[in-house]
Amino acid sequence: MEKDPSNQSKYETNIENDNSLTNRQGHPITNNQNIRTVGNRGPATLENYDFIEKISHFDREKVPERIVHARGAGAHGYFEAYGTVGDEPVSKYTRAKLFQEKGKQTPVFVRFSTVVHGLHSPETVRDPRGFAVKFYTEDGNWDLVGNNLKIFFIRDAMKFPDMIHAFRPDPVTNIQDSRRFFDFCANSPESFHMVTLVYSPWGIPANYRMMQGSGVNTYKWVNQEGKAVLVKYHWEPKQGIKNLTVKEAEAIQAKNFNHATQDLYEAIERGDYPEWELFVQIMEDGPHPELDFDPLDDTKLWPNDKFPWLPVGRMVLNKNPENYFNEVEQVAFGTGVLVDGLDFSDDKMLQGRTFSYSDTQRYRVGANYLQLPINAAKKRVATNQEGGQLRYYNDKAPGQNLHVNYEPSSMGGLTEAEQTGKEYTPHVEGNLVRESIDRNDNTKQAGETYRSFEQWEKDELINNLVNDLALCPKVIQDKMMALADEADEEYGRRLREGLAEKAKSMNNKEEFGQDFNPHPLGAKEASQAVDDAVNKGHDADPY
């Protein structure tokens, strides 16, 4: 029962009712939108108890399949550095060894994936695609963990479990439901740019070889003098970019729901090695108040006319896995896996991911997941870690006193390495707050993206949105139309007209605005398939 504020005790600091959100300790959650940061831009702090409780439980929801990115394909290859960033020596911006020498090759393993659906789901679903690269560098591993699309739905890691819950199948019916998807997105308006991309043909890449990749989040490069710049990473396929309409995807799925995995495998087997060029965008470190967006906001693109794409190297995939489970299924990535010369930014999604990813791997694969060959660094490893599930060798140095598994010690234990590059020491000052960043225009770039689409892409976007929004309650439709109106006049008008026309054409007018037809995103004829199975099925006698 809701409390009467007039009877509130002077010692109470919040008002809790029967519907109030709490954590497992019973503590009322008064802010479920923002992690706690120094100022509204970050960085985050380790004592984000509510967030850590939320994300660490989320990391353990599924066993043993990945919670997200379960369906995937992978391949081995190499990254070849240009030694430059654009026309300048790369050393001006980063001291990371893998970039320094022209022609230097670093082994890589790449895993492509769909995000929301399960291990054996079709590869034609409307969904972002994962694009994760593990670099086995001479300084240890670097994981560049991203997607095919260059932005994301949310800008604060606190909302990630809620987002995935809304996008995954309903916990009662176990069917993906567009009403749940749009309910979350309509009430999280920062997602509108990503919705515009996902519901366009960019939401169904033709295959893994012909899609872009992106680091999505903002990172930093650090040079020998300890000076840092902000960077964004972009992979561009030399094979070209191809996307699919809904009808094209449905036709492919009817013939082969493994088509993207098969395409990648067979291309490598015949020697048609897929290749991507790696570009970076560089921005001076700082808040950049002159911009109308925050460079740490992962729902935003950095305009390439102001921050041009600069080539730094190329990647070639030339070897298929020898065993799918050992390599593709057990490979484990983490956004916190960086080498000297690469660093984090205060991007709040990145900081949340950095805890979540490695925490998930320790739960999913085990505490010693980094001893598996696919995850192990291709250099010496020496730690004082002990025990844990499935541990099968000691990370010890030659000649190390095996009795000493701690540091510091005077009896032959491991010692700290000497740092030669100047340490990067960013200045941090501000109150610890739970706030969104203060430049949060949610629709401007969505409008720019809409206007950049070709006509057939606009038509496909509107058609896909109309088909799914038609089954959502009016309150959700109204919120989505308002966002489209803000983004672009034509975008809003076409969506509004499409929904009005859809309402007239639906056979049962009561169905408009009611989700009697839960289905994977964009699969408008899913309900018809249920009826077809009954009506077109052939009778048979028992045997």
Image (cartoon, grey):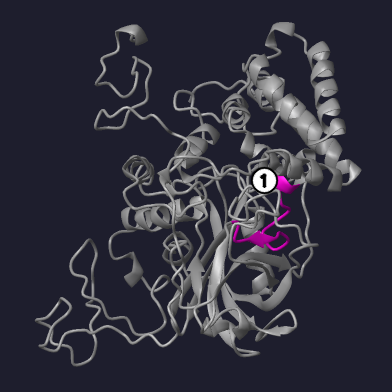
Is residue 213 located in the magenta-colored stretch of the structure? Answer: yes
**Placement of 520 over or under 204, stated as above or below:** above
Label 1 secondary element:
loop
Taking 56 as reference, is 164 left or right? Answer: right
Left or right of residue 173, residue 405 in this image:
left
Magenta part, dominant SS: loop
Q: Is residue 91 visible?
A: yes
Residue ID for mark 1: 124
For this rendering, which residue is in front, 530 or 540? 530
Membership of 519 in magenta stretch: no
x and y, in percent, of residue 498 in the image: 83, 23
Task: Give the image location of residue 174, x and y in percent.
Answer: 49, 29
The image position of residue 269, as x and y in percent, is 64, 73
Q: Is residue 127 above or below residue 189?
A: below
Residue under the image location 73 percent in, 53 percent down = 206
Location of residue 24 in the rendering, given as x and y in whole percent from the top left corner: 27, 32
Q: Nearer the viewer, residue 476 or 482?
A: 482
The residue range painted magenta reads 202-216
Residue 31, located in which quarter of the rendered image?
Answer: top left
Quadrant of the drawing holding the N terminus: top left
Against 128, residue 383 (above or below) is below
Say whether residue 121 is left or right of residue 357.
right
For image coordinates 64% across by 60% down, the residue present is 214
Q: Is residue 528 visible?
A: no
Q: Amino acid at mark 1?
A: Thr
Q: Is residue 164 left or right of residue 190?
A: left
